[in-house]
Image (cartoon, grey):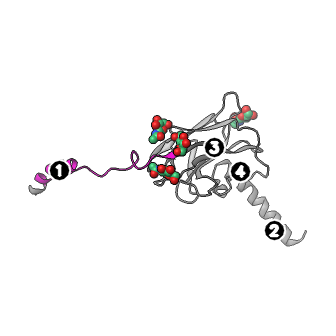
Amino acid sequence: MDPSLQNIVVLLGVLFPLLTAAYRNGRVEAACMTMEPGHEVAGQTTDPPYSLTMSKSNYSDGEELTVTLSTNPGAVQFRGFLIQARAGNGKTPLGSFKISGSDAQTLKCTTDASAVSHTSNSNKTSVQVTWVAPRINMSDIQLRATVVQTKLIFWMPVYGPTLNYTGSGAGQISAPSLSQLLLCSTVLLPALFRL
Ligand SMILES: *[C@@H]1O[C@H](CO)[C@@H](O)[C@H](O)[C@H]1NC(C)=O
Ligand SMILES: *[C@@H]1O[C@H](CO)[C@@H](O)[C@H](O)[C@H]1NC(C)=O
Ligand SMILES: *[C@@H]1O[C@H](CO)[C@@H](O)[C@H](O)[C@H]1NC(C)=O
Ligand SMILES: *[C@@H]1O[C@H](CO)[C@@H](O)[C@H](O)[C@H]1NC(C)=O
């Protein structure tokens, strides 16, 4: 065999299991842009047997919404997923995610925690994460998921509802009110003066 070809074969032999392992543990940063699992097959074209739902269909600046990816009744459970929020045909992930269970992990796609993925290839009926909305009015922002059932069977994108912006509010960290400041200073001042 040609020595350089031999090198390539050896390299592939080393890399391929690494890549496969990477997908199994959900470190799928390589799929950030396309959101494709990279299984060398096309996604299913039938209606996805999974649903991506949100606790609300609108958001305010920095508001936290609960996101649920679930298996429809009677359907085969899923093993892998990648979830991002994007606006229209945009490629930039928006907002960030927080996780609570061990089934999900955040990924740094553009910014920290701008995507979430699975942590193992176990069968999952549903997974829940928190999405922290951006502080910007995007008119057609939607969460979207790639959902992997088996290595060769996946659906993408599975869309969440289109979210409307309701302005600044709930999610914003409010400045302390004047009365809070006054209360604070009346409590603190005597203590400071005793020094
Ligand atoms: C936002 O969504 C919630 C629940 O989905 C709804 O009750 C509320 O009226 C909506 N607010 C606006 C301003 O559309
Ligand atoms: C996951 O579910 C599939 C289909 O129901 C089944 O064939 C497979 O054995 C399950 N895998 C595990 C790890 O439980
Ligand atoms: C979002 O806004 C559009 C345009 O104002 C409106 O038609 C639609 O009903 C709104 N959707 C929700 C879920 O509030
Ligand atoms: C957000 O942008 C849309 C489209 O430009 C506009 O119709 C809507 O009034 C804006 N919402 C807020 C709360 O500013």
As drawn, the residue found furthest toward the bottom would be 3
Residue beneath the point at 85% across and 68% down = 5
* Front-lying residue, 73 or 169: 169
Residue bearing the label numbered 4: 37
State whether label 3 is within 8 Å of ligand 3: no
Foreground: disc 2 or disc 3 = 3
- Which amino acid lies under the numbered mark 4 shown in the image of this protein? Pro
Q: Amino acid at mark 3?
A: Tyr
First along the sequence among labels 4 and 2: 2
Per the image, the residue denoted by label 3 is 159
Q: Which residue is mark 2?
A: 7
Q: Residue at x 76, y 46 (%)?
A: 43
How far from the left and from the top, in percent, is residue 152?
78, 44
> Looking at the picture, how far across and down is residue 137, in whole percent?
49, 53
Q: Are marks 2 and 3 in contact (CB under 8 Å)?
A: no
- Mark toward the start of the polypeptide (3 vs 1): 3
Residue where numbered disc 1 is placed: 182
SS of the residue under disc 4: loop
Q: Secondary structure at mark 2?
A: helix
Q: Amino acid at mark 1?
A: Leu
Within 8 Å of ligand 4, the CB of disc 1? no
Q: Closer to the N terminus: mark 4 or mark 1?
A: 4
Give, as a single range, the part of the protein colored magenta. 163-191
Q: Earlier in the sequence, mark 3 or mark 4?
A: 4
Tell whether position 137 is magenta.
no
The residue under label 2 is which amino acid type? Asn
Alpha carbons under labels 2 and 1: distance apart: 73 Å
Label 1 Cα neighbours within 10 Å, binned few <14 / some 14-19 / many ≥20: few
